[in-house]
Amino acid sequence: MSLINLEVPDAASDRHWFAVRVKSRHEKIVAEVARNKGFEQFLPLNRCHHRWSDRVKSVELPLFPGYLFCRLNPGHRVPLLTIPGVVYLVGVGKTPVPIDDNEILALQAAIRSGLPAEPWPFLEVGQRVLLEEGPLAGLEGLLIEKRKQNRLVVSVSLLRRSVAVEIERNWVRPLNETCDTAPSDLSRR
C-alpha cells in the first residue's frame, strides 16, 4: 500500500525576490500599488536635503533609482507587470532572474539600522569585511572610506548597484587578508 502525500506545498517557497524596473520617479507609487495588490515589496529610501532657490527641504529618494524589489512567484507576475509605471522584471531576455535572498536581507538590515546610507557605485574588488559589532553585526560587505568616514558597501549583484552605510572602523573584521585593489583605489572623496 502506498501513501499519498497530502502536504500542501509552502506558498512562500516558490516566491523569490526580483528587481522591478519602473519609470523614473514612479518608485513610490508603484510600491504602494504593488503592496495594495498583495505583493511583498521593498523600496529602500534615502533621506537627503534638496535645495531649491528659495528653500531647503528634506526628501526621501530611492537608493536604487528606477527600481524596487518584489517577492513573488514568477509564474504569477502579470498583476505586477500591469501596474502603471512598471517597465519589466530584471532578468535575461524575458526570463526574470531572482536576487539572492542574502543580498536583500543585508540591504534590509542596513536600512533598518537607521545609519546614514547613500547610493554607491557597484564595487567588484575590495576588502570584504564582517561586522562584528553595532546594529549591523553579522553583515558582510566591502569596506570603503569617504571623507575620513568608514562605510560598508552592500550590493545587489543583479542590478550592479550598491549602497554605502556609515559604520565605525572598530566594528569590522577582515574576511580575507588579500586585496587586489589598494585602499586608496576604493576611496571616494
Image (cartoon, helix red, strand yellow):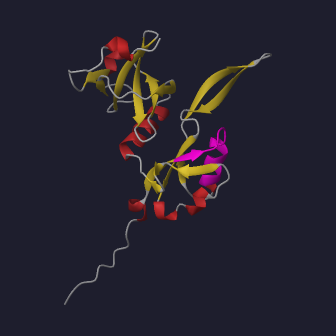
Q: Position of residue 24 (x, y in %)?
A: 65, 39
Q: Residue 80: which quarter of the image? A: bottom right
For this orientation, the residue located farthest to the bottom is 1
Q: Is residue 135 visible?
A: no
Eyeballing the image, is 89 above or below 109? below
Q: Residue at x 30, y 18 (%)?
A: 181
Q: Is residue 61 left or right of residue 113?
A: right
Q: Residue at x 54, y 37 (%)?
A: 44
Residue 94 shown in magenta = no
Where does the N terminus fall, quadrant-wise? bottom left
For this orientation, the residue located farthest to the top is 148
For this orientation, the residue located farthest to the front is 93
Q: Is residue 22 left or right of residue 98?
A: right
Q: Position of residue 102 (x, y in %)?
A: 36, 42
Q: Position of residue 3 (x, y in %)?
A: 24, 84
Q: Residue at x 51, y 64 (%)?
A: 76
Q: Position of residue 103 (x, y in %)?
A: 39, 40
Q: Which residues are magenta?
A: 20-35
